[in-house]
Image (cartoon, rainbow, N blue to C red):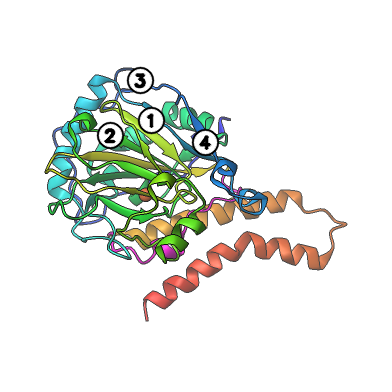
Amino acid sequence: MDPTAATLAFPEGRPGPYQPLQDEPPFDPGHHLALEMPAQIRHLEELGYGETDTQQCASTFAVSDAFRILSAEGVAAMRHVCNQIYHNRNASEGTGANRLGSYARGAGYRSQFVRDFCDSPELTQHLSAIAGVPLGRHSVPAVACGINYAPEDINRSVDTWHVDSVAFDVVMMVTDPTVLKGGEFQFFHGTKQEGQALLGITGEEGKDETLPEDRVVTIAFPEAGFGFMQQGSMIFHRACRLLERAERITVIPSFEVLPAHLPDSTNTLNMADWEDPGICPELARYEIWRTTARLKHLLNEIDLEDDAAALAVRINGAIQRLVDFSHKLAGKSK
Ligand SMILES: [Fe+2]
């Protein structure tokens, strides 16, 4: 079976604050997608990552330039959907370090069109080829289908320097990028540790400051419907503030590594502090699902000659993430 088709199904129902759209077209991959390959792909080594870092990643893919994803018809449909979801965007002003200006995570709860777009096998197969590793639509709905809007206050960055809590994501322009003054998407041409050290921050938190210009790359978006892909947990990046008020909408679908027993660097411990409705149960589903997959894989590998102590290490390796996540949840309810 194609491993990209084997991601976890979306949960039943939707969190209370999210309202389903009534007016949207059905997603039709034949009409709405117009997938092209990127002209340029950068690898982690080019950004200065060494073997120790790359060995912990599912792929050495780092970041691509922008490539076409949606047809003109797809752009029109996506924009119609995003404009409506704006009125039901997330109430929270941001997550953790209060980073994002205005956004709708879990857009797939509001829109079947967005859900089917993010879930489409055509998209995941295409992105898997770019990333050089089988990927599936992320099993955490909050990040599987994200939308980022320009903040009301244009003095604020659309998104400050940070790394993502998920390994692989796409940033796709839904509005016309050629009319924007400011609002550029940029990444630091270096390791995340180097970028974070230059700004004096740690972890995934954001900071709205500038990095040396000669180390910053701006992604060129030729038109709406183009997006780029990144291993977002390894790329230090930001979306600059707008210099003039304008519509700037990006759709940000996220993906995880498949098959599910393989390592995937989604940072559920960080995400458990987000304020999104339903986020902790969503993350618990992710961790339970992937732990189950690791245990099943281990079950099939156990040999009667196996050493007891080595077995203990492998069992702990299979369950450690779930145990850590459970402790995180227990700590939250105190
Ligand atoms: Fe990001």
Task: Looking at the image, tell me whether mark 1 or mark 2 is earlier in sequence order.
Answer: 1
Place of residue 177 in the rendered image (x, y in percent of width and height, measured from the top left): 23, 32
The answer to whether the residues at label 1 and label 2 have Cβ atoms under 8 Å apart is: yes
**Left or right, residue 282 beside residue 47:** left
- The residue where tag 1 is placed is 66
Q: Which residue is mark 2?
A: 173
Which residue position is annotated with label 4?
42
Mark 4 lies on a secondary structure that is strand
**In whole angstroms, how far apart are the C-alphas of marks 1 and 2?**
10 Å
Using the image as rendered, state which of residue 123 and residue 17 is in the foreground.
123
Is residue 11 shown to the viewer in this render? no
Kindly state the secondary structure of the residue where label 3 is placed: loop
Residue sitting at the far right: 305
- Dot 4 and dot 2 residues touching (CB under 8 Å): no
Confirm whether the magenta stretch covers residue 269. Answer: yes
The mark nearer the N terminus, 3 or 4, is 3
Left or right of 67 in this view: 54: right
Decide: marks 4, 1 in contact (CB < 8 A)?
A: no
Query: In the image, which disc is placed on residue 34?
Result: 3
Amino acid bearing label 2: Met
Point out residue 55 in the picture as x, y percentages from the top left corner.
Answer: 65, 49
Cβ of disc 3 within 8 Å of ligand 1?
Answer: no
| Of the pair 193 and 131, the residue shown nearer to us | 193
Magenta residue span: 260-276
